[in-house]
Amino acid sequence: MPLTLPFTKGHGTGNDFVVIADPEGDLDLSDAQVATLCDRHFGIGADGVLRVVRSRALAEGATADGAEWFMDYRNADGSKAEMCGNGTRVFAKYLVDAGLASIDDGLRIGTRAGVKTLTRSDDGFEVDLGAFAIEPAETLVRARGLDVARPGVGVDVGNPHVVVALSSRAELDGLDLAYQPMLEPAPRHGANVEFVVPADPLVRDGVGSLRMRVFERGVGETLSCGTGVAAAALAVRHWAGPAAPDRWMVDVPGGRLGVRVRAGDVLLSGPASLVFSGEVTLA
């Protein structure tokens, strides 16, 4: 029987999502249905689906202490993901605009990577992604457009990333990310892969800056990846050493995002937009 769903399309620096309101957790979207929604030729088109559901309605929401709403994020291929930094801002924008939540005193939302708190920022919203970890072992990364494999550093910000430094903007632009980069050793659950070029000079007025492209697992290349931006800034900060700043600006194809490190946590800031709403019918 066909299923007709109201939806809203939103994005954060071009990282776009189909937002589905399901407060009581009545929907059980299959991987194929999510993939259809995200298909850019036969569906609405998006990098993923954000299902807006009350934490109490989900078994996964049982640990979302103090968070009324849970962000059930699915990649474009239907697979579940732990977190989505840009998605949290779009999720917050939807809740606030729909009158479902207030952000005045901080908005807590549940995710598979724990509860995240969002506040307003000068450029939109800021989310505290929580603690991060730099992996001690290097990962070898092969990508179409690179003449030789490059070492990458693993960064965990609630979901897994591997960050690779490149030598120039031309090398970054020359990557063909229509093909998935190959990682050795391959992470058990996969990883997003970020390619970065630090600015020259790296730091200006106490703020570091870099440029990034990303291949997201379960999606492909996207215009932006919020957790990837945080991971990229953390990796460059790690390479730069103890004198590296705690504030960073990261340029991605879809725009610019801010990162700051505070007391062992990493925070991500940037815009969020809701662009249109409608209804879609699924088989």
Image: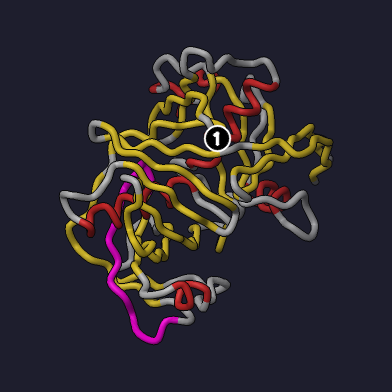
- Report the span colored magenta: 146-159
The residue singled out by tag 1 in the image is 123
Category of crowding for the residue at label 1, using alpha-carbon neighbours closer than 10 angstroms: few (below 14), some (14–19), many (at least 20): few
Figure colour scheme: secondary structure
Residue furthest to the bottom in view is 147
Q: Quadrant of the N terminus?
A: top right
Amino acid identity at mark 1: Asp
The number of numbered discs placed on residues in the rendered structure image is 1
Residue furthest to the front in view is 205
- Secondary structure under tag 1 reads loop
Residue 188 inside the magenta-drawn segment = no
> In this view of the protein, which residue sits in the foreground, 124 or 25?
124
Which residue occupies 78% across, 52% down? 43
In the image, is residue 47 above or below residue 111? below
Query: Residue 259: horizontal and vertical position, in percent?
Result: 39, 42
Which residue occupies 68% across, 27% down? 21
Query: Could you tell whether 71 is left or right of 250 in the image?
Result: right
Query: Residue 86: horizontal and vertical position, in percent?
Result: 53, 42
Query: Residue 228: horizontal and vertical position, in percent?
Result: 43, 52
Which residue occupies 62% across, 51% down? 47
In the image, is residue 21 above or below residue 196? above
Residue 157 inside the magenta-drawn segment = yes
Residue 135 in which image quadrant? bottom left
> In this view of the protein, which residue sits in the foreground, 218 or 117?
117
Query: Residue 30: horizontal and vertical position, in percent?
Result: 64, 44
Which residue occupies 48% across, 80% down? 144
> In this view of the protein, which residue sits in the foreground, 4 or 66?
66
Query: Could you tell whether 161 is left or right of 90 in the image?
Result: left
Residue 280 in which image quadrant? top right
